[in-house]
């Protein structure tokens, strides 16, 4: 089983505040996002691409999203 979770949050970050996990959710009823489950990784990736426009070239490993966010601010 593979899960895809979409977190919609306010972009409250700055060079001094990079913790994207602390950003305020847009929907207070979904503070941990909305998750869809799939039988295969290919199905999950296809869903993320079609539903959210995700690109295979822009995925990041767990634990580095703050670094990527910091780089996007520069």
Image (spheres, rainbow, N blue to C red):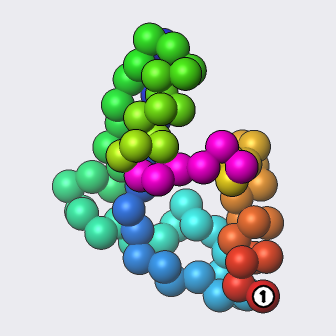
The residue at the point 66 percent across, 43 percent down is: 56
Q: Which x, y percent locates residue 60? A: 73, 48
Magenta stretch, residue numbers? 52-57
Q: Which x, y percent locates residue 58? A: 69, 53
The residue at the point 38 percent across, 23 percent down is: 37
Say which of 50 and 33 sits in front. Answer: 50
**Above or below: residue 21 compared with residue 39:** below
Q: In the image, is residue 54 part of the stretch drawn in magenta?
A: yes
Quadrant of residue 18 in the image?
bottom right
**Above or below: residue 74 compared with residue 32:** below
Q: In the image, is residue 39 part of the stretch drawn in magenta?
A: no
- Asked which secondary structure carries label 1, the reply is loop
**Above or below: residue 16 compared with residue 63:** below
The residue at the point 27 percent across, 52 percent down is: 30
Can residue 54 be seen here? The reply is yes
What residue is disc 1 on?
74
């Amino acid at each position: 089983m593979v899960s895809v979770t979409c977190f919609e949050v306010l972009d409250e970050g700055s060079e001094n505040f990079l913790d994207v996990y602390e950003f305020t959710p847009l929907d207070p009823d979904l503070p941990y996002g909305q998750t869809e489950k799939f039988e295969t990784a290919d199905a999950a990736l296809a869903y993320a691409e079609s539903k959210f426009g995700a690109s295979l070239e822009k995925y990041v490993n767990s634990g580095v999203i703050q670094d990527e966010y910091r780089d996007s601010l520069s």
